[in-house]
């Protein structure tokens, strides 16, 4: 139910949860790419890019004094190439949409 005074009508309310069958073609699916730029000699650099080439998120092991990836240290992802864990983190932070996809390149 939409409350009185809410500018957004129920007709255009965002879909929460799974998309109803038959309506998939009307939902914008954000397609993200996890691009590993460098992974050698203890240095790891990667970025998450959207369909338009805009960088949404960067990972750089050189940001840490010990050369570790903070997402791994804090338990958000299991390892540097954990696409599922990274995708869940990006959704929880509002960077990625729940209906988005994330694929790894490189």
Image (cartoon, grey):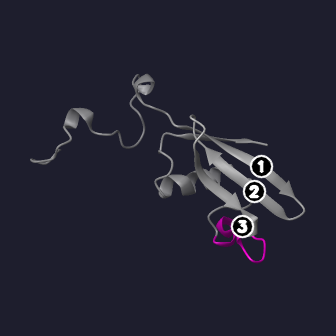
- Residue 19: percent from left, percent from top: 41, 34
Residue placed at 44% from the left, 23% from the top? 25
- Residue 6: percent from left, percent from top: 15, 47
| Within-10-Å neighbours for mark 1: few <14, some 14–19, many 20+ | some
Residue 81 located left or right of residue 90: right
Identify the secondary structure beneath mark 1: strand
Q: Which residue is mark 3?
A: 69
Q: Marks 2/3: CA distance?
A: 9 Å
Q: Which residue is mark 2?
A: 45
Judge whether residue 67 is colored magenta: yes
Residues at discs 1 and 2 in contact (Cβ within 8 Å): yes
Q: Which residue is mark 1?
A: 37
Looking at the picture, tell me which residue is in the foreground, 17 or 61.
61
**Identity of the residue furthest to the bottom in this view:** 65
Residue placed at 90% from the left, 62% from the top? 41
Task: Give the residues in magenta.
Answer: 63-74
| Within-10-Å neighbours for mark 3: few <14, some 14–19, many 20+ | many
């Amino acid at each position: 139910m939409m409350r009185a005074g809410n500018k957004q009508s129920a007709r255009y309310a965002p879909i929460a949860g799974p998309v109803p069958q038959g309506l998939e073609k009307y939902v914008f699916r954000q397609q993200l790419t996890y691009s590993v730029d460098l992974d050698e000699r203890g240095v790891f650099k990667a970025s998450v890019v959207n369909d338009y080439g805009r960088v949404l998120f960067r990972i750089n092991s050189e940001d840490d004094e010990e050369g570790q990836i903070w997402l791994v240290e804090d338990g958000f992802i299991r390892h540097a190439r954990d696409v599922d864990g990274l995708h869940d983190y990006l959704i929880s932070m509002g960077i990625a949409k729940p209906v988005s996809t994330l694929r790894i390149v490189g």
